[in-house]
Each structure stands twice: as C-alpha cells, then as structure tokens.
Amino acid sequence: MPKDHGIGAASKRREDVRFLTGTGNYTDDINLPRQLYVHFLRSDVAHGEIRHIDTGAAEAMPGVKRVFTGKDFEGVGGLPCGWQVTDRHGQPMQEPAHPVIAQGKVRYVGEILAAVVADSRERARDAAEAIEFDIAELPAVVDMKAALAPDAPKVHDDLDGNLCYDWGFVEENRETVDAAIREAAHVTTLELVNNRLVANPMEPRVAVGDYSRADDQSTLYTTSQNPHVIRLLMGAFVLGIPEHKLRVVAPDVGGGFGSKIFHYAEEAFCTFAARQLGRPVKWTSTRSEAFMSDAHGRDHVTKIELALDADNNFTALRTETHANMGAYLSTFAPSVPTWLHGTLMAGNYKTPNIYVNVKAVFTNTVPVDAYRGAGRPEATFQLERVIDKAARELGVDPIALRRQNFVTEFPYATPVAVEYDTGDYNATMDKLEEIADIKGFAARRKESEARGKLRGLGVNAYIEACGIAPSNLVGQLGARAGLYDAATVRVNATGSISVMVGAHSHGQGHETAFPQVISEMLGIGEDQVEIVHGDTSKIPFGMGTYGSRSLAVCGSAMVRATEKVVAKAKKIAAHLLEAAEADIELRDGKFTVAGTDKEVAWGDVTLAAYVPHNYPLEDVEPGLEETAFYDPANFTYPAGAYACEVEVDPETGKVTIERFAAADDFGNVINPMIVDGQVHGGLAQGIGQALLENCAYDENGQLVSASYMDYAMPRADDVPFYTVDHSCQTPCTHNPLGVKGCGEAGAIGSPPTIVNAVIDALHSGGHKVDHIDMPLTPSRVWAAMQG
Amino acid sequence: MHMTGSREIRADRETVWAALLSAEVLKASVPGCKELEGDAEEGFQASVTQKVGPVKATFKGTVTISDMQHLESLHLAGEGKGGAAGFAKGGADVTLEPTEDGTRLSYEVEAKVGGKLAQLGSRVIDGFAKKMADQFFERFQEAIEGPADPEEAEAAEGTGGKKGWFKRLVKGEAGA
C-alpha cells in the first residue's frame, strides 16, 4: 500500500486549489491606494552614447508625476554582483558599474534610458513617446570571439577590453592534462554551442514599491525566488535602506527557472521612486520587455577534448569555453560558467585529469545568468556529446563505454574539487535500460524505417551538484553571501503548526511537501501544518530557492527546528506524565512513557505550552516555537541516466521525440508525484532547448527573437509521454532527510540525450554527421544531411 | 539587409534625374508617405506610416541626398524613428545610364531596423524591405511614365496620354 500521508506519499498539491481557481495572489494582483505606474523607455540600439535626453515635453503630459533619468541615480548605488571570480593569474574579474538607469552610454537593446511615472499605465506609456533623446550609435559587439579581438569596440570604456575573466580550473593541473592528452591512444574533439535561452516564466516580472512616511518603512512586492537576497542587495548596496526599514514580499510567483533570483533595476527603481514621490509605484513587465530585460541563460561556446587509453578508459579531459556575460554582470553571473560548471566536468566518470578554461566575455547583449541547471547543463552537454562521439569513433557501444568509466566507489573526490558522497550510476543505467526498453529499439527502428523515417536512440548519464552550499566553501570560491537556509516552526496552542521558511515556492510545491516531513516527524495530519514563505517580515533570514536547494537546505533547517520542538515538547510531556524525559517517546501524535500505557496527546502538550498552569516553569519557557539555520556540509549529487528515441523525417529534417525515459537518483523522495512533475517540466525545457528555443541577435545587437512568433517555446505536441523513475535511491549522506533535489535534473540531462539520438538517426541513414548545434530545427538537420 | 535591382524607365536621364530630386515625386513614391517637405539641397523631412508584421507606426525622419554626380548617380539616406516601434535606417546608391528606350535606373539598398521592429518583425522584415523598395521604384517609374496598367493608361488617355504626371509637368504638358 502506498502511504497516504507523510514522507513518500503522493499528496495532492494543496496550492493548486488556488492556482487552478484563479484565487492566487500574484504581485500584479497587488494594487495599493494612490498607486502610480512606471513605464520604462528602453534603448533600441545595442551600443550608443547618450548625448541628450529632454524630458520636458513628457513631464508636461497629462497625469505624469515625474520622469527619471540616469541623472536621478547619480549617487545611488549600482546593481551589485554577488560573486567574484578570481582568474588564472590570481586577479579578480573585471567588474563594471551597473547603473539602475543608463548613465552616459547604453550597452544593450532593452537597457533603461528613462522612467516615466504617471497615474495610469497608458499615460506613462504615452508620455514615454514624448521624451526626446539623441543617442549616437556606436559599433556593437555581439559575437564573443570577435569581442576579444584587440580592436573590438569596448562595452565598458573604463575596463581593459571585453574579457571579464580568464579562469583556469584546476590551473595547477593544466600541464599534466596537456601531457595526458598528448600521450593518449585516442582523442575525441568536439566544438559546440550551448544556445542562448530566455527563461520565459509564465508570469512576467512585476514590482510594486511602497513607502510609508509615518514609520519610514519601504516595502517592495516583487516576483522573486529569494526575498531576503533582494532585501540584502537592494537595501545595503543600491538604495542604502537599513534592513529593519525595508520589507520585501514575494507572494505567489508564476515560475522563475532562475530568472527571478537576481536583483533587477526595475525593482530598485520602484522602491526608490515610491520614496521620492510618497506614493506606491508599480511596474508590470510586458512579454516584449521580458525578452529584453530578464537575464538570459546559457550562451557558451566550447571546444572539448576527451582522451582515452588503448582500453577505452578516459584518461584526460580538456575544455575551452567562451561564456557570454552580456553587457553587465547580473547577480550571480560569474559563478555560472565557473563554479557551477567546471566542478561538474568529471560527470559520472573517473577521468583522472581534467582542465577547464573559461573566458567570460562582455558583449552588447542582455546580461546572462543562471537558468534552470545553471552551468551544469552546459557541463553535461559537452561531456555527454563528446563521449557519444568517442563511442562512435571507436566503434563501441555508448552505454558500455559509459559504464566502463563510471565512478563506482564513494565517497569519490573528483579532480575538479568536489566530493561525491554517494551514488550508483550502474543502478540508474540498469533501470534506464529496463524502462526505456533499449532491447526493443532495433525492432522499433525497423518499423520507423518501413515508414521512411530515420530512428535514433540517444542515451546519457548526468550528475549535478545541488543544495548549494557550504557557506565556508563558497566563500572561498568568491560568493559574497552565505548559502545556508532557515526555518521557524511555530506550534500553536491547539497543536497546529505554522512553518516560516526561507525557501520560496514558485511551482515547486513546498506548501504540500514540507508539511509531509513535519507530519512524518510528529505523527500529526499534514493539514495541521501551514507553510509561510515569501515575506521578509514573516520569515527568518533564508537564502531562497534555486539550484534544487529548497528541501535539501531549507527542509533540513525545518527538520532541525522540528527536532528542537520535539525535544522541548518531550520535557513538557515528561512533566505532564510525571515521568523521566529520557523515557518519553513521540509516536503517531502521542507522547508515551516507554514500556507503559501512559500517554498524552500532541495537542495537550502544545496547549500546556501556551496555558502553562501545570508546567515546569522553572526548567522550561512557555510557548513552543523554534528556529534553526542549516548550513550544508557538502553539495548533494543527484544523478541519473536518460534515453530518448527520435524519428527524423529525411525529406524535411523534422525531428519528433517518440520516447523519453528518465531514471533518476534523487536520494529519498518526499512526494513522488511532485518529483514526477518537476522532472516532466525539466524535460520539457530541455526539449525546448534541444529542438526549438534560440535567442538570436543580429550583427548590430538587435534582439530578433523577442516574441513567441520567433522564439519557439515547446508546446504540448512537441513533447512525448515520459517514462520517469526515481526508485534508485542512494540517500544523501549529510543532510537529515537524505534528499538530493530534483528541480533541474530534467533540463540538465535531456539536451545531450536528444542530440545524441538525432545524430544516431542520421548515421543510420548513412549521413556521417558528427554534430549539429541546438536547436535542432528542421532546417539545421536538413542542411546537415545535405553535407 | 542588402538589396539590388534595376528598372528601365521610358524617359531621358534629365527627366529621371529631376524626378529623383523632387519632393513631390519622392512623396508620391515612398509607400505610406503622409508628409514630405524640404528640398534636395537641405534634405527632406518625412512622415511615413507603415505596418511591418504586427507593428504599425508612424516614422518621422529625414531623407538626405549626397554624392550627387549630375545625371549619373547619387546616394539617398533615410532614417526614421517610430517611437515605441523602434527605428528604420537605410541608404540607396542610385545610378542612371542612358539606354535605347530611355534610362536604366540601378539601385543598391542597405537597410536596418531596430527596437520593436527588429524584435517582432524580424521574420518579415526582409520581405517587407524588398516590397518597400519594389513599390518605391514602381511608383517612381509610374510618376514619370504613367500607370503601367493598360486600363489605367486608357483611362488616363483623355487627360494627357500615357505620360506620367511628373513627365507632363516637366515637359510643360500639364493641363494641355
């Protein structure tokens, strides 16, 4: 019998009731009395000198309160970058100023040039058209390699060229790796592009700034994955508002995928303008604005070399990557191609020598930052593509080649600075072969061929590092923040519980899954537990949700706080039962004295805590509320194996995904239904990247894929029915729940699986194609088939 | 984006050259042109309303003529700002050569768009620009020669034969 509550139960998502009945409370649903609206005038050139802005005519338009330009933000802080990378030579990265409103120059299409605040959205928009400005267009750099040429136009005049950093990892191993590659029996080389993506959460970004003169309090309502991070960055670095005078609220948020981690200019503006004008100021992004102002993702260009010995053992790996930063450093941008990417280059394999070089480059494009997977999809894509190519070159089975090189003993310290605590990559590969029916592929290929289609099978294995992260470690690596999380478990008098968590739920189902943990620990109903999140005035200082960290880090904090609650409740129960504290057991919502039939219910103990008439007041404080902060000892390492079967139409190059199977090891699973959903969503995004999505600029830096007419999102008929399994479980060894995280796996593991399958299909048709860059659109596949 | 083309115009080079420098001809030739003022020496100010894919906007801008080699070639440069719709910029190198029947007008056009036009209209922009260039020279030719359509030409016969209004104007045949 599957469990019907607690850990492991497929409890239905309670938040869906409000999401599906239109009763959610999103930031755009928040409307405050006397609210004003801001419209941002954005640069329509990629690079230019601002010669002149005249806001006079706009300010005279009906309903306009004020027009702000870069001048109004002189003396105000810029948007901070939260991670400093040190380069190969021990020097800090180049870090340009990042103004809220452009000052002197514009550096990408979409950068804010001026902000019109008016009493309606329409009037603000109309007035923006009346702003007169003169921008002298300058040559733009879009291509990363061109941006590094000595005579390339400079994105930032005050920096030394367009190179943000040249990172080597592990720099000391470079020569050893070079030697191993020189001496190898076989070297497989691949050059590839990890295409630039736009996150496109269903809900665009929104910000409402408010200011109360009565108590000098600023409040920002914003679409964020981490309200405390925003409060810290905006309060301390941009606007200089002390934390006790600043509240950040992220209510229901309709998807983030990373793009809502970062601190953006628009939210700083609304908070700033609300103080200036003494009235609330609201901004709601249009979809067009989202394309040119939400941080983009990926955009890596890589050369990877895999060396093997005569027995096909991997002996060395060397990569050279160019990573696009865009025009400015977004909040966590420098960490993505480095510590979230280089550290994963070992993959599931015991390759002894690895060297990763990353050149991060400024270009006249939207800033690039973390997007679902952040660095790990880029690592997995390179590695799993080059392994597939090596298998083909050597004429060996790609699954066998992977198995031969799998890490099998744990803990395993990689040559790229991380230690995998646990895993079983053969187990997930075994499970994959079963659920994907690899044996039946040959027959299915015959059947496809009979219909004139080419059928291909692609497999891959992936690993990721989640649950970011040990604060002392990331501090050494350049993080300018700690990455613990926090939870407060507030037991109410009648026994129900409110849990205030630092994690933020914007699709992950925390409101359902977190109570399952408490229910399991205390033996009370899940419906007795409510999760409170997203408001810095209500929750403890937590770092928010990204990198599949919520359950592994914040969930662990919640477990620790609940353990403290239980310890205190046992003292109270011992008093009520007139027994020794050591003899008290908590089971099924009752405290019992071991070996007796004496018991007291959970609710009686909690009531005693708040009505302490018969209570050990000399030993125990009244009340029952505990907070814990949890800082993980290591990353968690979810891993798995994926298989995809595609059909390629040789006439048109059209790829259709016929089957997709995912065997994941997420450690312990709290709610298998939510985990299925997370994997499904990740797979859909990975399919989008592999086949459809591409963010494109023209050579002048114009964004030419800025609507759903030109940026192809996956739709229902682009994805198959998935077969997913997470029964292979090697629990994480260092967090109390043994969980690893499941939010990004699908987006990490699927792109190489799909490309591998398409290449396999083309080879079956006699087309000796080594690689096609994503997205594998019909025109690209068709062109590759023509040679 | 880059386009080239040429047209045979049944008029002598002097007529075609004069037409190229005429505000009225330009106004009649630029598709969607609402206003056009100024002259060839000082440049023209124009207001053009166009729909590109999903974006409809009025572009206000300038057209300047430079590199004039009398009767042989000139460069037309235009730049229009459409407010929230973005901007369009373009230039055309135009050369004239005498032929047996009149004049061959050849052109090389460079055009680029920015802002919302690029973001929303990129898929259609090449086709749109080609259509704009075709229409421009079509209408330019008509202004000189008269309508290419035989029915229209017949209808026009009563009021001055097959010649275009500009040709009639410069040849002093208007109202004849």
Image (cartoon, coloured by chain):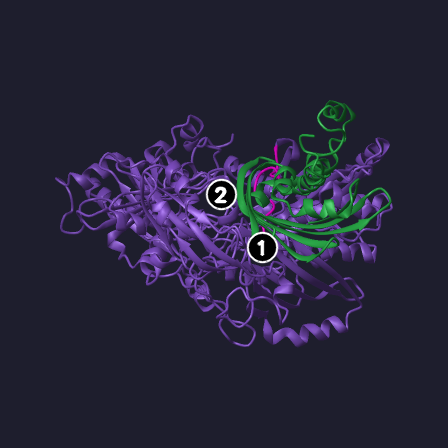
Chain colours: A purple, B green
Residue A193: give x, y in percent of width and height: 67, 55
Residue A264 seen in the figure = no
Depth order, front residue of A612/B89: B89
Query: In the rendered image of this protein, does residue A81 appear above or below residue B145?
Result: below
Q: Which residue is mark 2?
A: B84
Query: In the rendered image of this protein, does residue A492 appear above or below residue A197?
Result: above
**Secondary structure of the residue carrying numbered label 2:** helix
Name the kind of residue labelled 2 in the image: Ala
Confirm or deny contact between disc 1 and disc 2 (CB under 8 A).
no
Task: Please check whether the numbered discs 1 and 2 fall on a single chain.
Answer: no
Residue A321: give x, y in percent of width and height: 63, 63
Depth order, front residue of B61/A219: B61
Majority secondary structure of the magenta segment? loop
Q: Residue at x 52, y 48 (%)?
A: A292
**Secondary structure of the residue carrying numbered label 1:** helix
> From the viewer's perspective, is A122 left or right of B126?
left
> Mark 2: few, some, or many residues within 10 Å (few <14, many ≥20)?
some
- Number of numbered discs present? 2
> From the viewer's perspective, is B120 left or right of A627?
right
Q: Residue at x 43, y 33 (%)?
A: A5
Range of residues picked out in magenta:
A701-715
- Which mark is drawn over residue A376? 1
Q: Chain of mark 1?
A: A
Depth order, front residue of B95/A512: B95
Q: CA distance from mark 1 to mark 2?
A: 38 Å
